[in-house]
Image (cartoon, grey):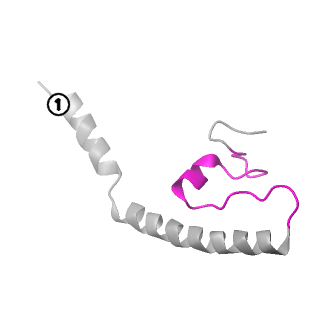
Amino acid sequence: MTGPLGGDEAGLGATPLWLGWLGVAPAPLTGRITAGRLASAVAEAVLCRTRAEEIAGRIAAEDGAAPVVEAVERACITP
């Protein structure tokens, strides 16, 4: 069953669509798998890993909670 994010969020099936949109997961192989299609999928997976590492670095470098805390403080402390 496909979940609300475009995949099987329980991890039992298809790759969620948003991973493909970010370029961090290869497209699923459908139909007959040939040596050429498999080789292309492996090459795509290597590129996806590079992209995933780039995104992970950017996420690790940001302070995601700080803007939320500032917005809540502004909303609660505004006279």
Q: Nearer the viewer, residue 50 or 33?
A: 33
Q: In the image, what residue occupies the spot 25% across and 37% down? A: 71
Side of 52 relative to 40 (left or right) = left
Would you say residue 59 sits in the magenta stretch?
no
Q: Which quadrant is home to the N terminus?
A: top right
Q: Nearer the viewer, residue 73 or 24?
A: 24
Asked if 31 appears above or below 57 in the picture, the reply is above
Q: Residue furthest right?
A: 32
Q: Main secondary structure of the magenta part?
A: loop
Q: Which residues are magenta?
A: 7-33
Residue 38, x across and y down, in percent:
78, 71
Side of 76 relative to 23 (left or right) = left
Q: Nearer the viewer, residue 70 or 43?
A: 43
Q: In the image, what residue occupies the spot 85% across and 65% down? A: 33
Residue 27, x across and y down, in percent:
68, 57
Side of 58 relative to 47 (left or right) = left
Q: Residue furthest left?
A: 79
Would you say residue 22 sits in the magenta stretch?
yes
For disc 1, the marked residue is 77
- As helix, strand or loop, the secondary structure at mark 1 comes to helix
Residue 50, x across and y down, in percent:
52, 73
